[in-house]
Amino acid sequence: MIDSGTSITVSLVDHYDTQAIVDLYRAGGWWQDDYDPSEIPRLIKGSFAFAVAIETTSNRAVGMGRVLSDGVSDAYIQDLVILPAFRGRSIGKKIVSLLVKHCTKAGLSWIGLIAEPDSEEFYLPLGFERMTGHVPMIYRGED
């Protein structure tokens, strides 16, 4: 059990420990065994913004999120994950708020994301709403 008094800091980073980020991707269910961990530094550098939540006592990464954008028009928040033992402590809200602030400060007003099923209630108080008339899609190859 994690002490609720534990201090968490959330910061934008341009590099971070590769294994810690891999562990967070695993916690989100997004890491595949054939992925190359050596690509993590490039993934972080290639993001418009990359935020890491750190538990200050242990200096352990407990959450992350990032933004993809050209820095001119649209921005997309993705890869938001908090380690299960640290959920329910507003860490995700701190990460999203920092990412949104970074985007709006850069002049980006269209900020989107694709929410996991049943996570709408998390995003609504942060200013997000369902985009009626739109369907998220993914490329799976041509016929």
Image: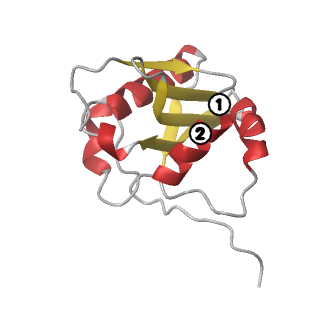
Residue at the spot x=55%, y=49% of the render?
25
Please state if 25 lies on the left or on the right of 63 as rendered: right
Measured from the top left, where is residue 109 in percent x and y? 52, 27
Residue at the spot x=47%, y=59% of the render?
134
Q: Which mark is residue 36?
A: none
The quadrant where residue 76 appears: top right
Above-or-below relation of 36 to 137: above
Measured from the top left, where is residue 138 in percent x and y? 62, 65
Residue at the spot x=72%, y=47% of the render?
37
**Residue farthest to the top?**
105
Above-or-below relation of 135 to 88: below
Measured Cα–Cα span from mark 2 to mark 1: 7 Å
Query: Which image quadrant: the N terminus?
Result: top left
Residue carrying label 1: 17
**Residue farthest to the bottom?**
143
* Residue type at tag 1: Asp
